[in-house]
Image (tube, grey):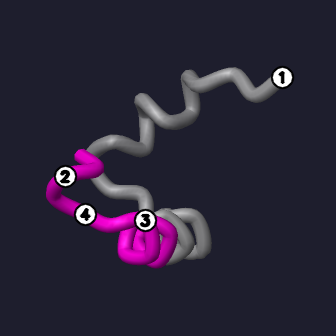
Amino acid sequence: GARVVGLGLAETILEAFVSGSFEGGRHARRVTKIELT
């Protein structure tokens, strides 16, 4: 939450998450069920 992670660190974490690649694995089947509109 905002009290634990500052805005700058939250942005850094989000950027790392969004720019990372998905390696598949045990959740790949669930991810294919997500519809992007």
Q: Amino acid at mark 2?
A: Arg
Foreground mark, 1 or 4? 4
User: Disc 3 on helix, strand or loop?
Assistant: helix
Asked if marks 1 and 4 touch (Cβ < 8 Å), the reply is no
The image position of residue 18, as x and y in percent, is: 57, 64
Q: Is residue 21 magenta?
A: no
Q: Which mark is residue 14?
A: none
Tell me the crowding category of disc 4: few under 14, some 14 to 19, or many 20 or more residues within 10 angstroms, Cα based.
few
Magenta stretch in the rendered image: 1-13
Q: Residue at x 16, y 58 (%)?
A: 4
Q: Amino acid at mark 4?
A: Val
Q: Which mark is residue 5?
A: 4
User: Disc 2 on helix, strand or loop?
Assistant: loop
Q: CA distance from mark 2 to mark 4?
A: 6 Å
Q: Amino acid at mark 1?
A: Thr
Tell me the crowding category of disc 1: few under 14, some 14 to 19, or many 20 or more residues within 10 angstroms, Cα based.
few
Q: Residue at x 75, y 28 (%)?
A: 36
Q: CA distance from mark 1 to mark 4?
A: 31 Å
* Quadrant of the rendered image containing residue 23: bottom left
Q: Which mark is residue 7?
A: 3
| Front residue of this view, candidates 31 and 13 | 13
**Nearer-N-terminus badge (2/1):** 2
Q: Residue at x 42, y 29 (%)?
A: 30
* Quadrant of the rendered image containing residue 34: top right
Q: Is residue 33 left or right of residue 2?
A: right
User: Disc 4 on helix, strand or loop?
Assistant: loop
Q: Identify the residue under disc 2.
A: 3
The image position of residue 22, as x and y in percent, is: 49, 64
The correct choice, above or below, for 26 with respect to 19 in the image is: above
The image position of residue 25, as x and y in percent, is: 32, 56
| Front residue of this view, candidates 9 and 28 | 9
Q: Which mark is residue 37?
A: 1
